[in-house]
Image (cartoon, rainbow, N blue to C red):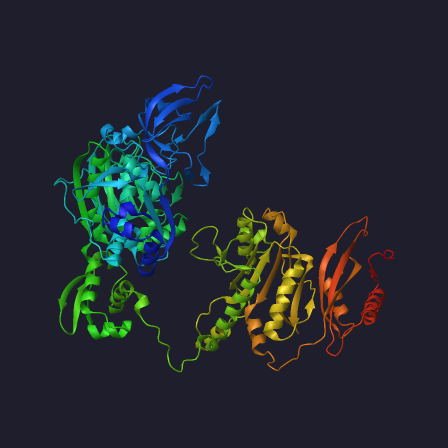
Amino acid sequence: MKTPLSWVGLYTPLDTLLSQNSITELAHKYSIHTAEIDDIFEYTIDGVVVGKVLSCQKHPESKKLHIVETFLGNETVTILTGAANVADATYVPVAKVGTVFDGDFTITPRKMAGMMSHGMICSDDELGLSPVRSEGIMILEEYWDRDFLETKIGSNFFDLKLPFATTNNKKTELSLGDTTFEIDNKFITNRPDLFSVVGNAREWKTIFGIDMLADIPEYAPLVKNEPAKAVHIESELCSAYCLLETRQDTPKASPLAIKMLMHRSGLVPKNTIVDITNMILTEYGQPMHAFDADTIKGDIVVRMAKQGEEIEALNDETYTLTEQDLVIADEDGPIALAGIIGGKRTAVSDSTTHTLWESATFDPTAVRLTAQRIALRTDASTRYEKSLDPLLATKTFTRVKEYLDFCQMNAEILGQSKYIDTKQVHNITIKLQWDFVQQKIGITIPQEKIIQILESLGFEILAQDAQGFEVQVPSWRATKDVSIKEDIIEEIARINGYESVPRIPIPNCQPLNEKNPQKLLKNILLEFFASRGWNEVLNYSFTNEALQKKCLQTTENAVAVKNAYTKDYTHMRTSLVTGLLGNIESNLRYSDTLSFFEIGNIYGKTGKLRPEVQALTDENILLPYAETTMIAGITTDANIAGVRSDLEILLQKLLGYLPPIHQKEDTNTYFHPGISGVYEVGDTRIASFGQIHPKILQAFDIKIPLAYFEIDFAILLDLASEKDKSFRPISAYQALTRELNFVLPEKTHVGDIARDISGVHPWIYDVYVDSIFRDDEKIGSGLKSVNFTFGLQSMRQTISDDEVAEVFEKIITLMKEKGYKLRGEESLS
């Protein structure tokens, strides 16, 4: 979630913190106490100042350009611009010469139509204030008083502040200069409050020990009247449903302050009504929806959908519903998919003047399952899936009124209603002993600090004595977050700082890796491949029929996913190649030198179960499908000799010997026929490697060859465990590397030839294919020229040139006996 600090600053004061600490220091402290900051976006540009237009004339030799004499406080500069509206401007934002924009675009003196321009008059989107491209420059007197701007000529443009909506009856302003933190909260499923500006403000308050200027106000009716539309709740999957009825002006573009906050929060402004719902979604974390009240027929009903009902949604998609889908409906049918998306029939339009504002709470599981089934996740469904506080839905309408007033919509409140299922409002109290807190955390934290931490986080201390205390969990943390004593302990420990807990080794504790050989081997593999230039990736364990087909595989042995989240995730993967090919495909636009590897599980309907799972059969327990851990890698280095070299170094390191290499017909279909090999011990296959099949490259529109390997983790672990630990001396004599090039029939397995060469003499310790060349004119039709590289080394002597020649002769003789000849000799007969 992207959170502008200026927005957080409306609820807790950050000015002092920002002046005394660097942004990276604040981000680090927030990360270690609450949630990781994924990215930081700075919205300020050094060198942009407030300028005053002294004169504006059309360029005599250009139909579009204007010559603008601009006063910058201490100098007057000539700027040429093509913006037509500059003729109406007096005060403008000016990027002086030397100003650097994103993308390293620097403002320099520039000749335009025969004249020099010394700066740039900017639009609001160029300054990061709006995502919508402007047709002209930004005219400052449209937002600020002229007398005020006169005092700001030459000053930093980003020091200006925009008026903003009244917050809890207090006038507020937003600085144009801002910083946005992108918070990694997508996997924090127990903290729906972190999906809001206010929730993050509470964390800032507690972490840094500052005040809370405002919070979400408690429910207060704006009018006594009920809305014209009655609401009927027919499902327990709706725990709160509130309506606000207003009459207001037709929607228009939102004020710049709203557009700026939305842009910096990753949202796209639409119009005042839609923008207000999205502002409250981001600010409070409460999804809202606005209906055009005049398009709703009869009463509003919250019910389960009827089998086969359809709804045309705001995204122009039509969804067929089931009896498991919760909907909002009128007498003509569904008008919204509860918690996911609204319907097009009752959507707000450019002519809407009568609006029903919905603020509700829906069952998280029901929302998630419907979103999965229709393959649609929205900002609303993301929040509902985390279990929202039902009381929050009752607290939004005061903020709606504040935004309507700020947008000057001339709104009249016609009616308001509230439904809440009190049985689903969690009232949780927890008792703890002081000794229990110390025992669990491992250090003594003063009782006063414990109370201060909890109260700052919104917990109410109901009782306290020498033995312990009792707390009331705030409603926004009581959905599925804080429910037991250990949850309270976690809150105390994280705010106090995990770094304050000393590292004390457990006595007589065997290292974890020695207890877990799987973990040890995995760490060895991660370190090995990373050290050799491979980059680790982690892909989803899913595939689909189309992707399998692209990889020359089927879904016949693939396990189907019953509750598939999207059409891309319909089956469990049967190999790692599908994900790795996708990694290559998506990264080739950035680089053509790529090497990725992954350690992960593959699944199948048939195959061996893991031993620990197989042991359950005696208890007649329903077993899962077969699961195999694989190590796989893919690289844009088309020469498989590099892949083979890495594999042989790894196998030699782990096994203490190099298994025989073979060329087999039964390698996986995604390997290039004839350019692949396998390592086997007896009948047990450890690893396979080779080039990716050309048909697959064509299916992925990849123009370069790829090399690929895969290793069976369990087999590698078993063989590594059997490794001979005895000492084997290293030869003291120099190793030699030599090459021989043979012309072979196209269908000849080069792996078999390499194995034959390695058996010619005990000095030959390594043979691999360096390159393969094909040319009908130079080599001959149906033939290939294969270059074999092999090593020679003796344990007892230095090998002379004459002795090397003898080995060469033996190899050549063997090849001639098989009907093969050296490259350069006459063609095969």
Q: How many marks?
A: 0
Residue 567, placed above or below residue 47:
below
Residue 623 or residue 593, whichever sits in front: 593
- Residue 137 placement: quadrant: top left
- Locate residue 631, reporting x and y percent: 55, 64
Q: Is residue 734 above or below residue 19?
A: below
**Camera-side residue of 154 and 761:** 154
Q: Is residue 24 left or right of residue 620?
A: left
Q: Is residue 448 left or right of residue 787?
A: left
Report the front residue among 181 and 419: 181
Query: Which residue in the rendered view is the most extreme toward the top?
Result: 60
Give the quarter of the image for residue 253.
Answer: top left
Residue 689 seen in this snapshot: no
Q: Position of residue 584 (x, y in %)?
A: 56, 52
Question: In the rendered image, which quarter is residue 149 located in?
Answer: top left
Residue 262 seen from this side: yes
Q: Quadrant of the C terminus?
A: bottom right
Q: In the rendered image of this protein, does residue 518 appear above or below residue 175?
A: below
Closer to the camera in the image, 357 or 476 = 476
Outermost residue toward the left in this view: 224
- Across and down, in percent, residue 521 comes to 52, 71
| Residue 666 percent location from the top left of the image | 66, 63
Residue plotted at (16% across, 64% down):
461
Name the residue: 33% across, 40% down: 343
Residue at point 80%, 60% (across, down): 742
